[in-house]
Every structure is written in structure tokens, then in C-alpha cells.
Amino acid sequence: MTIAERSRKGGAFLIEETGASEVFTPEDFSEEQRQLADTVEHFVAREVIPHAERIENHDFAPVRSLMKRAGELGLLMIDVPEEFGGLELDKVTSALVTEKIFSSCYSGFAGAFCIQTGLGTIPLIYYGTRAQKEKYLGRIITGDLITAYCLTEPDAGSDALGAKTSAVLSADGREYVLNGTKQFITNGGIAGLYTVFAKVDREHFTAFLVERSFPGVTAGPEEKKLGIRGTSTTAVILEDARVPVGNVLGKVGKGHKIAFNILNIGRFKLGAWATGVAKVALAEGARYANARRQFGVPIASFGAIREKIADIVADIFRSESIVYRVAGLLDRRLETIEKGTPDYYRIYQKGIEEYAAECAIAKVYGSEALDRI
């Protein structure tokens, strides 16, 4: 069977029979993938967790040093093309690393890591020019340059196209002048490179690569959040921020393609994130159920508790199955696109977009399962 024949259309699971041999499962991980997963687990346990209290209290110095350490271990280059120093591995590996980075059940550094390797970097990979990639990707994969994704605004959350941040071309045609406020930006206080969405002439929704060092760019104070406290979350304020025309990402007026297509991968990875946290929650719950005693016996021996744990295991099994089945579908589809093809990343994105529903299912089911767990 050829690669094309093994590749199924998005949504085909609703109307076509699928043989067991066609479904990717965690039992199909290669030895290299398992070794990488072990590396991530050891990194989290030995190097991230000891700094958890400092990070929770908004001391982000450890986040910066840990990001560089992740770069040394090759964890920031999974999705980056080989020609720019990356590993360019498959979506199964990318999902596995995401699951394991969250497997500590500590989201502080993990949230920063996932923006660095996901929303903060993928738009540049898929839509950046060669010059932009050469300028930024090398520093991103070493952890020297932390990234952030700036889409949400005070009056534009889910309605991204309702953004009010504006961009006006300067008189000499060399820069765009940006004005507006982005809100709830993960990595906002520590990032050196923001992917910012603004409307050119208040009409054409466009993405820009904005360095923190550019004039007129500032980060607001840290948000005091109820959860995920250990990620830097701030507003990003643009006051006559001057951005070179060479830092337009993609084409003027095509920012919606970047915003919405990238979020498909974000949803898929959120499913992997939820699966990783759920597994550790199960381990902690089972430990407590065996340690806590009532009427002289562990509560794990009670039927009600055993039923709860059984339901949790079933939820995790379903969540994990969805994530890695979708990962396998994506990889098989993307394998049909030959590298070096003109408009490679445009076709690549179309391939991912074909599975938008499956990516959304992974996120919704994984998130709801984790909430129950």
C-alpha cells in the first residue's frame, strides 16, 4: 500500500471502516521516540520541578535558564526544519514530547515551553521568509530567544478578526507603526519575539514579527491568575511601535490564515497536554486512595472509589487513543507531500487543515476528560 493509499481524508472516520492496522497507537512508538520521552521525563523531574516554587512566585529567571537547557537537549527543535538547525520530526513525536513535558502535573514551565515550541514558533516556520527564519530560528531552538503569540485583545478574544490593533505604513515606506494592546499573552513578560496580529490601515488583518527591543513595545504587569500561575502572562502594549516592513509575516491581509491554521496544531497539542496531566493525576489519586484509610482499610478497597478510578483509566485510554490516532493521521497525510515542492508549507497547512475536526476533538475530549479526572 502506498503512502497516498494509507492516507485517509479528514473526517473519513465518520463514513469509512478503519482496520486496526491503520490506527496509530502508543504501542507503535519507535525506540527513538521512547528514548526522547524518557529524556523529557528526566528533565522535568530533575531540573524543572526543583524550581517550581520560585516560578510559581513569578521568579522567571529559572524559566529562562530551563528554556536554554531544553534547547541543549534538543527539545525546542522538534518541529523546526533541518536546514535551519532543527530535527523536523513527525507529529507523533511532537505530541509525545508535549505529553511528557506536562507529565509532572506542573504547568508553570510547561506552558512557557509549549508556546515556545508551538504558537510562538510554528507561524514563523510555516509562513516566514528564508531571511526571517535565518534571523530568528537559530536563537529560538537554543532557548536564547523566547517567543510569544499575540492574538487576543481586551475586546477581541474568540472573535480574532474583531481586533483593533492598527498598523500604518510610515511615510518613507520602511516601517509599519503599530498601536494597540494585546491581552493575556503567555510568555508576555519574558519573550523577546512576539507574533503580533494587527490591521493594516484598520482593514487588512496581518501578522508581524515584533521584537521586544523595537521602540514602542512594552509588556504590562504580570497577571495574578488563579491557575497556571507559573507562566508569565501579561498585556503587550504597542505605542507607535516601529516594525520594519521585512518583519511582516506572510502577506498583508492574510493574517487570518496564519491565526486560524496554526490553532489547529495548537488544539491537537492541547489534547496531548491534557493526556499528560491526566496520567499524573491518576497516579496521585491512586497513591492517595491506597494511603488513606477508613474503617481500618485503604479507601481504594471501597467499590465507589474503585469505580471512580476505573472511570478515570477509561477516560485516559480514550484521550490517549484520540491524540495518537490523530497524530498518525496527520503524519500519513503529511508524508504525501514531497519536500522541496513549490509552496511546500502552503500545501502542508492544507493537509493539517483537512483534519481540523479531529484536532478539535482531541482538544475538547482531552480537556473535558481532564476536568472530570
Image (cartoon, rainbow, N blue to C red):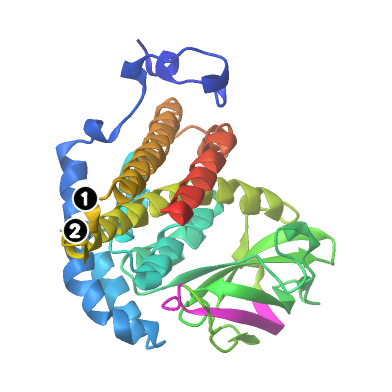
Main SS, magenta residues: strand
Residue depicted at 25% across the width and 73% down the height: 48
In the rendered image, residue 357, in percent from the top left (x then y), is placed at 59, 35
Q: Image check: 67 left or right of 6? A: left
In the rendered image, residue 168, in percent from the top left (x then y), is placed at 79, 72
Q: Which residue is mark 1?
A: 301
Find out whether the residues at labels 2 and 1 contact each other: C-beta distance under 8 Å: yes
The vertical placement of 259 against 216, above or below, is above
Query: Which residue is more in the foreground, 370 or 265?
Result: 370
Residue depicted at 60% across the width and 46% down the height: 261
Query: Which residue is more in the foreground, 335 or 26?
Result: 26
Q: Which residue is mark 2?
A: 298
Q: What crowding class fits label 1: few (fewer than 14 Cα within 10 Å), some (14-19), or many (20 or more)? A: few
234 within the magenta span: yes
In the rendered image, residue 37, in percent from the top left (x then y), is placed at 21, 51
Q: Which residues are magenta?
A: 228-243
Quadrant in which residue 320 is drawn: top left
